[in-house]
Amino acid sequence: MTRGHLNPRVDPGEPLTSVFVSDSVAQPADLRKVQASYDRVADNYVAMGVGDLAPAPWLRAALGAFAEDVRALGPVLDVGCGPGTVTAHLAGLGVDVSGVDLSPRMIAHARRLHPALRFAVASATEIDLAEASLGGVLGWWSLFNLPRNVLPDVLTSFARALVPGGQLLLGTHVGDGDIQRTEVYGMPVTWTTHLWQPQQLAALLSRAGLQPVAELRLPQTPASPPAPALPAQVVLAARRPS
């Protein structure tokens, strides 16, 4: 992963090819371990169809509402896009969307599977987005690895990047405490899943300057080896005031 200040901002209108480091957000101590873990699981993740939206009508509904609200407002950035499944879904709904992900291997899959879309290797903590440059930001089960002291600054950076009326759509795992993962999708990993209660996330979004739009809660999912059991889930939408 390239690091440096070759260009301090990501311009959503330009091809996404490099990593641009933000000085405003602390870099997690385990960033490289998490990156290596996602590189290891990427091939299995794609082969298993993880993140497939076909059996998830409620999630498709949330994405559809988000797309309807933001597609006329400007570009959308899918942060933690993985192999680009949801990026491509939003593109199919008429959204001008691009994706970034911490894992070079995930981005390689995204570029192979969706060659018409733009993808770059970058962490949520590394992108420095221009103020009021995006109609929407998506954090679709991609921010739960961020330490609790880092997530608020990341959400603030997303909020700042939204145009007035632009929205952040956030999906993540619900619960208390943290889960230390050592094996996921049949591969060894080293990462922490930080669980959040919906009201805690709503408070963080409010402190970032965003207003609530909608909230969707989903029950826990049993294990389906090699995929692990998942706790309850939540999707939150919030907008920058007009």
Image (cartoon, rainbow, N blue to C red):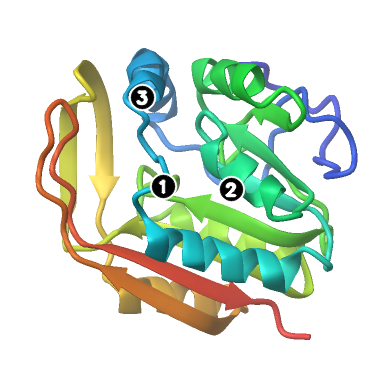
Residue on which the image places disc 3: 45
The label on residue 25 is: 2
Mark 2 to mark 3: distance in Å? 28 Å
Q: Is residue 182 above or below residue 40?
A: below
The structure residue drawn at horizontal position 89% and vertical position 36%, both measured from the top left corner, is 14
Local SS, label 2: loop
Q: Are marks 2 and 1 in contact (CB under 8 Å)?
A: no
Local SS, label 3: helix
Image quarter in which the N terminus is found = top right
Amino acid at circle 2:
Val
Of the numbered discs 2 and 3, the one sitting upstream in the chain is 2
Mark 3 to mark 1: distance in Å? 16 Å
Image quarter in which the C terminus is found = bottom right
Amino acid at circle 3:
Tyr
Residue on which the image places disc 1: 54
Residue 202 occupies which quadrant of the picture? bottom left
Q: Are marks 3 and 1 in contact (CB under 8 Å)?
A: no
